[in-house]
Image (spheres, rainbow, N blue to C red):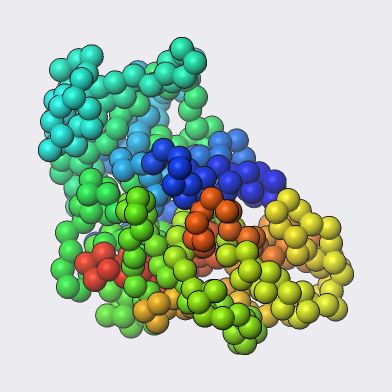
């Protein structure tokens, strides 16, 4: 697990790209593993294995609900000296279903009209150096042996100057973009677009599912929140936070001061609340934890305790409530960030912080708060649901 400093830095980079409106806009189950990041602040943290092409080439990819609007894949050829055995080879001789999107075909997903080749290709450079060549392609995506998404659009990145060190080959786009994998799932009134359960760390396993039955039809208890859109970030998944309670008692703060948009995010670690809401939560939490040894702050996490040598810890439950009737109840390991992830009786910090000012009052529900919970994206009905203790 990355240090608080690493996680905070990654969160800051991530949220500025997602929320700073003055910046540039950026039927099956697949096992998912959690590999906390160390090196790359924008690399995927959760991984699945999919197949691409016909016959399928198996590749390991991350998944993200807040991408730039395209699935990004490292492809051959690779830069000299870089590992190249686990990336996709976009060769017509190796895939009978590969389709090169022509330049200027905006209706097929090519975002540019002036290209250097007949295909939808361009170069990405930085300070005069090549970062990668990029080509927009379509091919068959296999997410289970008998489940295929034909004509799936993705951005092939070749000759990358920097590649992920964790063995992944790219990021699956699960955003609300019309070309995303989430938008390509065939839905019926009894199914949801996708859901996931995020593992707590590399030693545990979660899942990513597409087009499966609504959890309530399978007898699981689920609560749903209404999905909102927020301009100009319409690709993102926003809910409306309407309540925060601790130990079953609502925070003593006016509803109009608390309520606001909340972004559901899988690549941001901590949960960020409006500054006044966070201050009230912190005050009540500190009062309830007054019998425990206080530890120094760690980065932006300023409420920390030393549980070393204890046999038990009594921590009040934090519950986040959303418009539409959903609630997300956070247990000990969902609300605390541990210095030793394998030992809860170590130094731990409340995994909440004030939301950044550039976010215009948007709260962020990070991946730690979502751990162990199945998060259900019902795009047909415009809602997001929570099922407790699913992984």
Answer whether residue 220 is visible to the viewer in this image.
yes
Residue 47 drawn at (x, y percent): 44, 47
Please indicate whether residue 183 sits to the left or right of residue 204 in the image. left
Residue 218 drawn at (x, y percent): 30, 79
Which residue is at the far bottom?
Answer: 249
210 vs 95: above or below: below
| Residue at the image point whose x is 84% and y is 74% from the top | 292
381 vs 23: above or below: below
Question: Quarter of the image holding residue 305?
Answer: bottom right
Residue 332 drawn at (x, y percent): 65, 72
Question: Quarter of the image holding residue 226?
Answer: bottom left
| Residue at the image point whose x is 77% and y is 74% from the top | 286
Depth check, front residue: 180 or 24: 24
Please indicate whether residue 202 sits to the left or right of residue 239 in the image. right
The number of numbered discs placed on residues in the rendered structure image is 0
Please indicate whether residue 212 sits to the left or right of residue 389 in the image. left
| Residue at the image point whose x is 58% and y is 46% from the top | 12
| Residue at the image point whose x is 42% and y is 70% from the top | 240
Answer whether residue 46 is visible to the viewer in this image.
no
Residue 190 drawn at (x, y percent): 20, 74
Depth check, front residue: 177 or 310: 177
86 vs 200: above or below: above
């Amino acid at each position: 697990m990355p240090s608080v400093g690493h996680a905070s830095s990654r969160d800051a980079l991530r949220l500025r790209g997602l929320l700073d409106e003055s910046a540039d806009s950026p039927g099956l189950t697949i096992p998912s593993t959690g590999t906390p990041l160390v090196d790359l602040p924008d690399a995927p943290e959760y991984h699945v294995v999919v197949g691409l092409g016909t016959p399928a080439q198996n590749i390991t990819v991350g998944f993200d609900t807040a991408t730039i609007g395209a699935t990004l894949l490292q492809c051959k050829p690779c830069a000299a000296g870089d590992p190249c055995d686990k990336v996709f080879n976009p060769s017509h001789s190796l895939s009978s279903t590969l389709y090169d999107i022509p330049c200027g075909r905006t209706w097929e997903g090519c975002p540019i009209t002036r290209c250097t080749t007949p295909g939808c290709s361009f170069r990405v450079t930085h300070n005069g150096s090549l970062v990668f060549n990029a080509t927009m392609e379509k091919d068959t995506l296999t997410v289970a042996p008998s489940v295929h998404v034909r004509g799936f659009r993705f951005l092939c990145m070749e000759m990358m100057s920097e590649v992920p060190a964790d063995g992944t080959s790219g990021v699956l786009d699960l955003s609300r973009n019309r070309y995303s994998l989430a938008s390509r799932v065939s839905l019926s009134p009894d199914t949801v677009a996708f859901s996931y359960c995020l593992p707590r760390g590399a030693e545990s396993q979660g899942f990513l599912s597409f087009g499966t039955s609504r959890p309530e039809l399978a007898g699981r208890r689920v609560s749903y929140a209404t999905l909102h859109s927020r301009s100009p970030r319409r690709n993102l998944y926003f809910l409306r936070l309407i309540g925060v309670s601790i130990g079953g008692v609502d925070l003593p703060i006016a509803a109009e001061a608390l309520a606001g948009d909340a972004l559901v995010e899988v690549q941001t670690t901590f949960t960020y609340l409006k500054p006044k809401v966070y201050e009230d939560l912190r005050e009540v939490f500190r009062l309830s934890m007054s019998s425990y040894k206080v530890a120094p702050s760690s980065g932006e996490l300023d409420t920390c305790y030393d549980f070393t040598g204890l046999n038990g810890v009594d921590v009040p439950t934090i519950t986040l409530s959303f418009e539409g009737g959903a609630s997300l109840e956070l247990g000990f390991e969902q609300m605390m960030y541990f210095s030793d992830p394998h030992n809860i009786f170590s130094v731990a910090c409340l995994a909440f912080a004030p939301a950044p000012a550039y976010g215009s009052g948007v709260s962020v529900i990070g991946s730690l708060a979502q751990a162990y919970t199945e998060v259900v994206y019902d795009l047909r009905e415009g809602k997001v649901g929570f099922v407790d203790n699913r992984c």
